Image: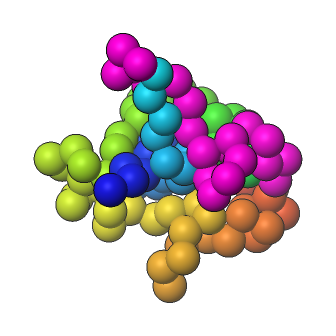
């Protein structure tokens, strides 16, 4: 079972997907991937991530995984790049000037 990873801003109830978590041999999270490539290799997602950091500057940010106990609550947050009906497409998010 693959575990999805998200950068979450709890105060804004907003998150951006980081992809599947990758672990090294010691079990430490070593990166994230989407499909067959590493997340940082996706230029559009990288731009969205930097915009997310700027938009949420001064707010608490945490990385959460889909197997975390509290993920059910987090799953209701608005997702940038998500497939859900109330999510924000990455293309639309990148066109926005102000934070969501």
Corner quadrant of residue 33: top right
Residue 11 coordinates in the image, percent (x, y)? 37, 44
Does the image show residue 86?
no
Corner quadrant of residue 95: bottom right
At a point 54% along the width and 76% down the height, the residue shown is 83
Given residues 81 and 39, the one toward you in this image is: 39
Task: Say above or below: 28 vs 34.
Answer: above
Residue that protrudes farthest toward the bottom in the picture: 85
Tell me the quadrant of the picture where the N terminus can be found.
Answer: bottom left
Residue that protrudes farthest toward the top in the picture: 26
- Left or right: residue 84 versus residue 72 is right
Does the image show residue 77?
yes
At a point 49% along the width and 35% down the height, the residue shown is 22
The reply to whether the magenta stretch includes residue 68 is no
The reply to whether the magenta stretch includes residue 40 is yes
Residue 75 coordinates in the image, percent (x, y)? 32, 62
Count the marks.
0
Task: Say above or below: 61 vs 85.
Answer: above
Residue 51 coordinates in the image, percent (x, y)? 73, 43
- Rendering colour mode: rainbow
At a point 21% along the width and 60% down the height, the residue shown is 72
Given residues 85 and 12, the one toward you in this image is: 85
- Left or right: residue 85 versus residue 13 is right
Residue 30 coordinates in the image, percent (x, y)? 52, 24
At a point 73% along the width and 38% down the height, the residue shown is 40
Corner quadrant of residue 29: top left
- Left or right: residue 72 versus residue 7 is left
Residue that protrudes farthest toward the front in the picture: 25
Tell me the quadrant of the picture where the C terminus can be found.
Answer: bottom right
Q: Which residues fall within the magenta stretch?
A: 25-44
């Amino acid at each position: 079972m693959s575990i999805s990873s998200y950068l979450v801003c709890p105060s804004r109830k907003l998150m951006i997907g980081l992809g599947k978590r990758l672990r090294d041999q010691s079990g430490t999270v070593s990166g994230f991937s989407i499909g067959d490539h590493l997340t940082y290799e996706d230029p559009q997602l990288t731009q969205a991530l930097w915009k997310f950091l700027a938009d949420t500057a001064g707010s608490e940010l945490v990385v959460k995984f889909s197997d975390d106990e509290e993920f059910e609550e987090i799953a209701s947050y608005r997702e940038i790049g998500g497939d859900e009906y109330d999510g924000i497409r990455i293309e639309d998010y990148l066109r926005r000037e102000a934070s969501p």
